[in-house]
Amino acid sequence: MAESKQFSCNPLYGAPVKEISSWRNEASLSQGGPEAAIPEPILEKWQKIVNLMAEMLDVPSGLIMRILGENIYVFVSSSTAGNPYHPGESEHFLGSGLYCETVVTENRELLVPNALFDEAWRNNPDVRLNMISYLGYPIRWPDGKPFGTICVLDCKTNSYSEKYKRLMTQFRDVVEIHLEIIYTESKRREELERLVEERTASLQVAVAQQAEANDRMLSEISQRKRTEEFLRRTQDDLARISRITTIGELAATIAHEVNQPLSGVLTNGNACLRWMAGVESNSPNLEEARQAVERMIRDGKRAGDVIVRLRNFFKANGGEKKSLDINEVVEGILTLVGHELERNHVLLRIDLCDRLPSVQGDSIQLQQVLLNLILNAADALAEVVDRPRELTIVSRAESGGVRVEVKDNGVGIENEKMESIFQPFYTTKASGMGLGLSISRSIIKNHGGQLRVQPNDGPGATFSFTLS
Ligand SMILES: Nc1ncnc2c1ncn2[C@@H]1O[C@H](COP(=O)(O)OP(=O)(O)OP(=O)(O)O)[C@@H](O)[C@H]1O
Ligand SMILES: [Mg+2]
């Protein structure tokens, strides 16, 4: 009742039923797990049970008490006259000295016919509410945890017959069956939530891993692209430097290629002047003079050609591929090295097929490949003293493209060196860089072809590449 000091009054005291139920559910919801919220239809049934209980046993109070946290609450209270207990009132449970504390902690029926005559119960808090007799039973969740009690209280002596006790345990059993339903349902929902959470978490992990993998892949791709671009540029630079060094070594022979036509120009110029002055026959011989001028023009063009080729050869690569005639590429490079071969007493054989398909390529790069193969052959031939030094350059049509061979009968290559000669910086020459073949191989590879070497049946080696 209001004068009770033991029960703290719930702020919802006297509030409409709906709000009381929402308190109940909030309170129990906060416990979670098996101490689940009691659904409204079940609460209504419990209300009927306690009403019936109080009516049948003819007492002012029929209660279902519930333990939540450290407190015990009046959970459902009979709507009977003189009932001093109201839903929502609570008391700190342990040490409260309430009848219900004994029922719950000892998990047993408790019958107190009259507390006033019972030393153990005389001072219990309910006595102060004038509730001197008590019959109560523990209510348990299916997992054995205490839910609370179901009990009746009277303000007069009451011994409650066996019949009433049986009735009370029947009511208790009904309440426990309800709890079992709630418990099973809440367990099922918990399991479901756990499963959903688990799946969501593993999905999230999978999504995060996938995103991470994508990021990694993207950065690897862009890193690889950057590296490839860097390598390509380095290779181009290297190829150009190597061209310049090679040409530097060929300076003498190139000077000769230019000087020869220039001295031709001089000779023919002088001859022309003589023919015009008529030094030989006392009258100008215009026909001879014309022929001398024609030779001058031819030589001038030849020297000009060499200069143009040289300039092209020094240029940085545009990497630009055009449709070209491979025979012209071969002939172009021979104008630069022809004299060098002659000087080294190399017998040059040129066997070019004149019905070749055109190929897509960068003529400067392809000339660089040929130049290196020819100079390598010349070096290999330089050591030959017991036989004629022969170099053969062949072009053939092959499976829709062309094949070019550079064959020498020089010192040859040991079988186990066939692959290492393509490694960068592999050289057997005092002044070699060991870059020629590795650059040549990557140029041909960039053209979609292959550069290979084979030993000859006789002495020497044959290098060949394919293009399409
Ligand atoms: N036709 C050949 N006959 C025999 N050995 C060869 C022939 N061509 C290449 N080699 C060997 O392969 C090595 C590597 O050749 P590569 O063209 O890569 O470098 P290099 O000629 O030594 O130097 P450079 O960088 O000036 O070209 C040569 O040093 C030589 O030992
Ligand atoms: Mg070389």
Image (cartoon, helix red, strand yellow):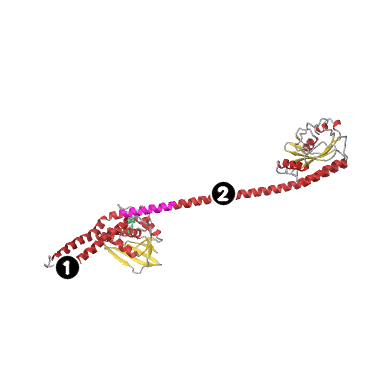
Q: Residue at x 58, y 49 (%)?
A: 205
Q: Quadrant of ligand 1?
A: bottom left
Q: Identify the element where label 2 is drawn.
A: helix
The circle on residue 208 is 2
Give neighbour class at mark 2: few <14, some 14-19, many 20+ (Cα, 10 Å): few
- Magenta residues, dominant SS class: helix
Q: In which quadrant of the rendered image does the N terminus lie?
A: top right
Give neighbour class at mark 1: few <14, some 14-19, many 20+ (Cα, 10 Å): some
Q: Is residue 6 above or below residue 361?
A: above
Instruction: Give the residue number, with chain letter if any, for mark 1.
Output: 286
Q: Identify the element where label 1 is drawn.
A: helix
Q: Which residues are magenta?
A: 226-245
Q: Residue at x 87, y 40 (%)?
A: 57
Q: Position of residue 340 (x, y in %)?
A: 26, 59
Indicate whether residue 89 is drawn in magenta: no
Q: CA distance from mark 1 to mark 2?
A: 92 Å
Q: Position of residue 184 (x, y in %)?
A: 73, 48
Instruction: Name the quadrant containing residue 26.
Output: top right
